[in-house]
Amino acid sequence: MAMNAWVILLLAGLLEILWASGLRFTDGFTRPIPSIAVLALAWLSFYLLALAMREIPMGTAYAIWTGIGATGVALLGMTFLKEPVSISRLLFLAMIVTGIIGLKWSSTSN
């Protein structure tokens, strides 16, 4: 089950990218369809995070989940929303990814 927990955590992180990115389309939760979609994606992301935490230590799972989300949203913003791209931003995103890999590598759950 341990490997499945890591796959579940990855999926939870990818869903976090989707719901967090989708927030901009809710217009402060005044648009029903995007709001419902964001809430459904957020709920599923949290649910999968909770499932992954059955096998992966809480601190590790949460840090990886937020790292995947933060990195993904930042990359989407730079790629599609004309947010600033700089060497320093990319370097710090690489540091987040390095931290995610390090947490997975050093985890007691394989």
Image: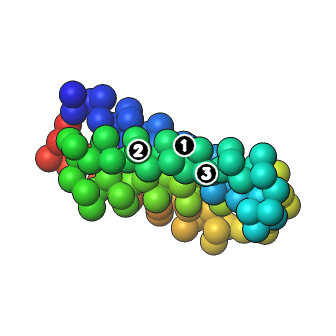
Q: Looking at the image, which residue is at 55% across and 67% down?
A: 92
Cα separation, mark 2 vs mark 3, equals 12 Å
Q: Return the residue at label 1.
A: 14
* Farthest-out residue, left: 108
Q: Looking at the image, which residue is at 46% across and 59% down?
A: 66
* In this picture, residue 51 sits left or right of residue 78: left
Identify the mark at residue 75; answer none if there is no mark.
none
Disc 2 secondary structure class = helix
Question: Which quadrant is home to the C terminus?
Answer: top left
* In this picture, residue 60 sits left or right of residue 28: left
Disc 1 secondary structure class = helix
50 relative to 23, above or below: above
Identify the mark at residue 47; answer none if there is no mark.
2
Instruction: For label 1, count other residues whose C-alpha is less than 10 Å away and answer few (under 14), some (14-19) or many (20+).
Output: some
Mark 1 against mark 3, which lies toward the viewer? 3
Pinpoint residue 96: horizontal percent, then vertical percent. 47, 61
Figure label count: 3
Instruction: For label 3, count other residues whose C-alpha is less than 10 Å away and answer few (under 14), some (14-19) or many (20+).
Output: some
Colour convention: rainbow
Q: Looking at the image, which residue is at 47% across and 58% down?
A: 67
